[in-house]
Image: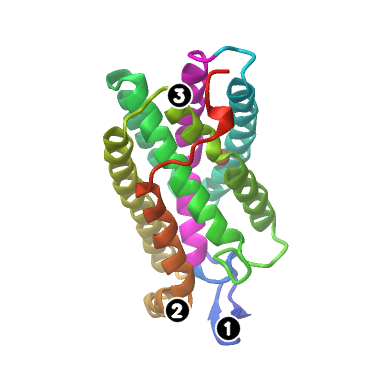
Amino acid sequence: MNIPQQQVTDRHGEDDTFAPFWNDTPIRTYLFDAFSVLLPAGEQFVISVVESSALQLPPTSTLADQSRSFVAEERAHQRAHRLYNQQLEKQGFNVQEYEHGIEKDLDALRAKLSLKAQLSLAAAFEHVTAVTSRIALRSGGLLSTSASAQTRLWRWHCTEEVAHQHVTTDLLQALGVPYWQRIFYFLAASALMTFDVLRHLHGFARLDIARGRVSARQLRQATSRLLLRDSANLVLLAAGWAAYFLPLKTNAASGCQ
Ligand SMILES: [Fe+2]
Ligand SMILES: [Fe+2]
């Protein structure tokens, strides 16, 4: 498969030669594409859990109303990322196989875990997604400033993730999920997401190297650049992740009023 090569100037002003990547460098592109693979099944899990949790609330409460808006937004994200992932599949990446594996794992968790445990997992997924979204959107963040379709989709999605993240943590409080349970599933969800994103990222890179879209040397350079020049983004990401260990802020809308 031949992909045309072009001269790319990255945002740090250095030239490198590889086929165009929508998020400036291969590694940053793989990172978001890998995350997208998780989303249709991950968002279905979160939607089902939020719907079940909201049934425990009076239907006229503020939080029940916010849960309904949350579900509508996640359904729209899900539709957009299904199309996004179909494009990845057309580019030759074996995305469907990854998606089916994730769907199977999450269905098994839904069948085995209590509602409080499922909600703890869903809130953890939402926290990691919202923290990543904040770092993606900040000036000099992880998302390209280009006007590509992918960048526009991610900016829309990340903005809604940051805005609605409180819904799952408010539900945790409303359903009385204890601290230990919230943290236990946060650690499990973080390990699961990291493993899956790295696995997909590795699969994308291996295929692109094999078909000559990028060389192993270019990929190493792009990875070093991510680790060195995006260090502020990575530190903020780690700090945002760790903030989940703090007690939750009490939200007036989280009660069952
Ligand atoms: Fe979403
Ligand atoms: Fe979300």
Can you say whether 194 is above or below 19 in the image? above
**For the residue labelled by badge 3, is the local secondary structure a helix, a strand or a loop?**
helix
Whether residue 105 sits left or right of residue 144 in the image: it is left
**C-alpha gap between disc 2 and disc 3:** 38 Å
In the rendered image, residue 56 lying in the magenta stretch gets the answer yes
Q: At x 44% / y 48%, what residue is drawn?
A: 128
Q: Residues within 10 Å of mark 1 (few under 14, many from 20)?
A: few
Q: At x 58% / y 71%, what residue is drawn?
A: 24
To which quarter of the image does residue 75 belong? Answer: top right
Q: Which residue carries the number 1 mark? A: 12
Q: Which residue carries the number 3 mark? A: 49
Residue 42: where, in percent of width, then height?
45, 35
Specify whether residue 37 is in view.
Answer: yes
Q: Which residue carries the number 2 mark? A: 225
**For the residue labelled by badge 1, is the local secondary structure a helix, a strand or a loop?**
loop
Q: Magenta stretch?
A: 28-57
Residue 190 badge: none
**C-alpha gap between disc 1 and disc 2:** 9 Å
| In front of the other: 44 or 22 | 44
- From the image, state whether disc 3 or disc 1 is nearer to you: 3
Residue 235: where, in percent of width, then height?
42, 68
Earlier in the chain: of badge 2 and badge 3, it is: 3
